[in-house]
Amino acid sequence: MTNVELIEKAKKAAENAYAPYSGFKVGAALLTKSGRVYLGCNIESSSFSPTNCAERTAFFKAVSEGEREFEKIAVAGGKNGDFSDYCTPCGVCRQVMSEFCGEDFKVLLGKNGEEEYRELTLGELLPHSFSLKAQ
């Protein structure tokens, strides 16, 4: 699957976001090494603490179905579905990614334009992460 195709899936997933408080809708598309794609969207709660991000939704869905090896994730988000800027994963999502992925795991950040994206590694987003592998 190409990077552009994965980003388009992330944008589509953002349409399912439940974001009545912030209006900031985020979608994620997680590609496993087995070739399956797991989608996630952010889901807000009025008490905020139980809110779950799109990236963690995708990871938790994949892990709950037995997946443990991941290739890359695409993330796209913005206020009211406007993808005019890059949306980076929060610190909690980065830490969850580091639980299952190495520093070379690819994180794609999508914007409005089809070919307009950035590719970073998890190591760039979360240097010196804590994980079982680091112990």
Image (cartoon, grey):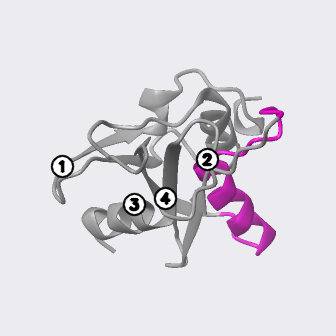
**In this rendering, which labeled residue sits more in front, label 3 or label 2?**
2
In percent of the image, x 33 and y 37: which residue is there? 86
Decide which of tag 4 and tag 1 comes sooner along the chain.
4
Lower position in the chain sequence, tag 3 or tag 1 = 3
Q: Residue tagged by mark 3?
A: 11
Sequence-wise, which precedes: disc 4 or disc 2? 4
Please name the residue that numbered disc 1 is placed on.
116
Q: Amino acid at mark 1?
A: Glu
Residue at position x 34%, y 74% in the image: 1
Residue contact at pointers 3 and 1, CB within 8 angstroms: no
Per the rendering, the mark at residue 19 is 2
Q: Residue furthest front?
A: 20
- Which of discs 2 and 1 lies nearer the camera? The answer is 2
Q: Quadrant of the C terminus?
A: top right
| Image quadrant in which you'd find residue 84 | top left
Q: Earlier in the sequence, mark 2 or mark 1?
A: 2
Q: Position of residue 63 (x, y in %)?
A: 74, 64
Is 91 a magenta residue?
no
Across and down, in percent, residue 111 comes to 27, 47
Mark positioned earlier in the residue sequence (3 or 2): 3
User: Vertical placement of 53 versus 66: above or below?
Assistant: above
Tell me which segment is drawn in magenta.
47-68
Q: Report the residue marked by disc 4.
A: 14
* Marks 3 and 2, how far apart at CA: 15 Å
